[in-house]
Amino acid sequence: MGAVQKPERLHIYQNHHLDSTRWDAYTPRDDDIIISTAYKSGTTWTQSIVRELIVHHLSPWLNPESLPLPDNRSSPWIDARFGDALEVMSERLETQIHRRFLKTHLPLDGLPFFPQVKYMVIGRDARDVFMSLWNHYLGYTDQFYQHLNQSANLIGKTFPRCPESVHLFWRYWITQGWFEWESEGFPFWGNMHHTQTWWNYRYLDNIQFFHYADMLANPRKEIQRMKNFLQIEVSEQVISTIIQKTSFSAMRERAIKRTESERTTFKDGAKGFFFKGTNDRWHGVLSTDELEMYQRTKSLVLTRECASWLEEGWSSFLS
């Protein structure tokens, strides 16, 4: 039997939001957890679940309040170009004594791969991602546009303002890529491309896939899958507590109470970031012609199996 093929870093992702070279400053620990989504697929939700699993697993040795709720300090988005300076981020990561859980929005072809690290990949139907991204993009403040576009380390073109029409944004997003090797995602980065790069290596033991729709439909089952993958032992009672604490409404309420710093990024602060948390809002919005654009791009970017999983979650493999 031949050697198992391992992922390779093929591209450098640098634009208004991303800088994949920031990962060169990362030194892995054997129990690190990396949570990866393209965007708007349950990143913060998954970070919150993992945080709760870690807290309850370490109790009573760890005071729950000593591990902050997920943010760019406790669970940093390393490839964010506008994040903390590399020296600051690296020092903060080195001083963390709990099991670390990090965030990335990079495809696997833009990341260094570490076999000792656990990778959690969260997927979502591209049409649902789009509707959530539309609200996200529409909510950006003037201050955040300036922060993205006027910094000295900007690489490439400036980030354009959100179109006033959801249909115009859809045509850009579903048919153009920001990077030359991508076919969709403009003006951010590829959404379906992201999932496919990870899906190609789903056979590796340290990569596990979770789906937004499955998490909505049966959070207990998905949290159980997460704890098993991460090798964290908690009781059924703890899982019930985690389900309550990481519900959309509970997370939204805590975020609003905790800080309004999101107002520098979103016009409505945390209320804008935690908007709906639901699927199928694209029905009645996208026309037949626009959905045909989706089908064409899907067939270009995704394998049939990956496309089926992105649209339906793991239930598509049970029939």
Image (cartoon, helix red, strand yellow):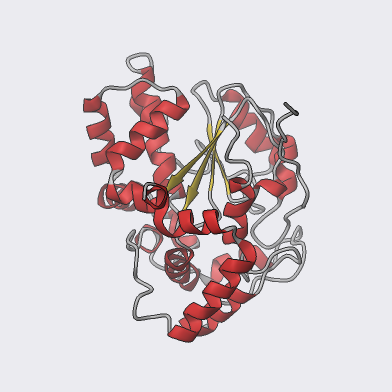
Residue found 22% across the figure and 33% down from its top: 240
Indicate the quadrant where residue 54 lies. Answer: top left
Q: Residue furthest top?
A: 61
Q: Is residue 5 visible?
A: yes
Total numbered badges shown on the rendered structure: 0
Name the side, left or right, on which 222 lies relative to 82.
Answer: left
The image position of residue 37, as x and y in percent, is: 53, 50
Name the side, left or right, on which 233 lies relative to 18.
Answer: left
- 55 to 310, vertically: above or below: above
Front in this rendered view, residue 80 or 66: 80
The image position of residue 280, as x and y in percent, is: 34, 67
> In which quadrant is the N terminus drawn?
top right
Residue found 69% across the figure and 64% down from its top: 182
Residue found 74% across the figure and 71% down from its top: 157
Name the side, left or right, on which 296 lies relative to 45.
Answer: right
Front in this rendered view, residue 187 or 64: 187
Residue found 63% across the figure and 45% down from its top: 84
